[in-house]
Image: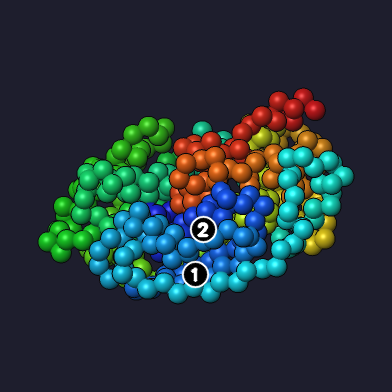
Amino acid sequence: MFTSESVAEGHPDKLCDQISDAIVDHILRRDPQARVVTEAAVATSIVFLAARFDSPVVVDFPYIAREVITQVGYTTGDFNGKTCSIVTSLKELPEEEYSRFDERVLTDDEMDEVTVRNQVTVFGFACRQTAAFMPLPIWLSHKLARRLTSVRFQKILPYLTPDGWTQVGVEYENREPRRIHSITVIATQTSSEMTLERLRDDIRQAVIEPAFHDEALKPDGLTRIFINPEGIFLTGGPSVHSGLTGRKNAIDTYGEYSRHSGAALSGKDPLRIDRSGAYAARYAAKNVVASGLAEECEVLLSYTIGLARPVSVQVETFGTGQVPDSEITTRVERLFDFRPAAILKQFNLRHLPATIRGGFYRKLAAYGQVGRMDIGLPWEMTDKAVLLKSY
């Protein structure tokens, strides 16, 4: 049995991710070649923003933070977008020619000159457990978390607050999902008059049942369902527990079913290889599975400072490969370009914020940065599957 968890967009850690990525969107929308790294921390009545950036763009950091906080739903109480204090630590970096290039017109030799500035090992994973090529536990946990937010915005359960947690446990046999072992939903409320019995009935009917309606694997009579097992939670959010950018890496990726980098994904411009490299690794892994070469695939990319290409590319198919892993690795290395500039060009990563209404990276900051079927993510395409199969 394997469990994965997700959280609603009002969870303090996810709130910080959204603030950080909203700032990234704002700067890249006006200056695609900008460098920016932003972290946020929240607690009762306060937001702390630390940003380092290289761009002439004028940014009202507090305004962006307040806008995100309000849109997520924190409009009243001890923590809200209007009255919270915002402290900033901003550092404008000297302009570097390193980032001032247009990857769309670079020659192959020029791409070799764009080397990585930080060393990291990133992982991409894909499997056939869901239509999105994602592990079933994290897929279902995200569905529950999104539904928890949806019923609040649609005023189906208007008494809910933005914070919430979900967890799904799946029983496996021979690496195949067999049944839903357990479901946990923890919701926070604003009304002290709410009874635990009513809350549990509402969550079952409005959240759990619709989330599993279209799923092949549904809860059965033995599935253990926990709804606020410790009782009623009032308010939730930063008034109760603090948050920090980049603290939910497993939720952002594969729910711990596969490995992931220790580096945060949110709050960074895509020239940072620890962000764009994770997307490229997912792209390669998904195409391997889509090609039929394996039922499961994990792609590892290791980068070191001063080089453009990864120093190590490894493929693991966990015994499900139709050909040896070494052969799949060879095909992946020949068909995928993992250099930073090539990834930027392939996915158009520095220009997406200007083309997508409401920003691009902020949309990734909640409910997963991979495996999304509600956003047309370039790294979710399977356009190289046929080539991998016939290579």
Q: Residue at x 22, y 44 (%)?
A: 156
* Residue 287 visible in the shown view: yes
Camera-nearest residue between 68 and 144: 68
Q: Which residue is mark 2?
A: 23
Q: Is residue 92 left or right of residue 80?
A: right
Q: Residues within 10 Å of mark 2 (few under 14, many from 20)?
A: many
Q: Residue at x 31, y 69 (%)?
A: 83
Label 1: element kind: strand
Q: Is residue 131 left or right of residue 229?
A: right
Camera-nearest residue between 242 and 289: 242
Marks 1 and 2, how far apart in space? Answer: 10 Å
Image quadrant where one finds the C terminus? top right
On the image, the x and y values in percent for residue 375 come to 50, 38
The disc labelled 2 sits on which kind of residue?
Ile
Q: Residue 264 got which mark?
A: none
Q: Which residue is mark 1?
A: 49
**Could you say which quadrant of the image residue 188 lies in?**
bottom left
Placement of 13 over or under 87, stated as above or below: above
On the image, the x and y values in percent for residue 94 come to 70, 68
**Could you say which quadrant of the image residue 260 lies in?**
bottom right
**Could you say which quadrant of the image residue 348 lies in?**
top right
On the image, the x and y values in percent for residue 211 come to 35, 40
Q: How many marks?
A: 2
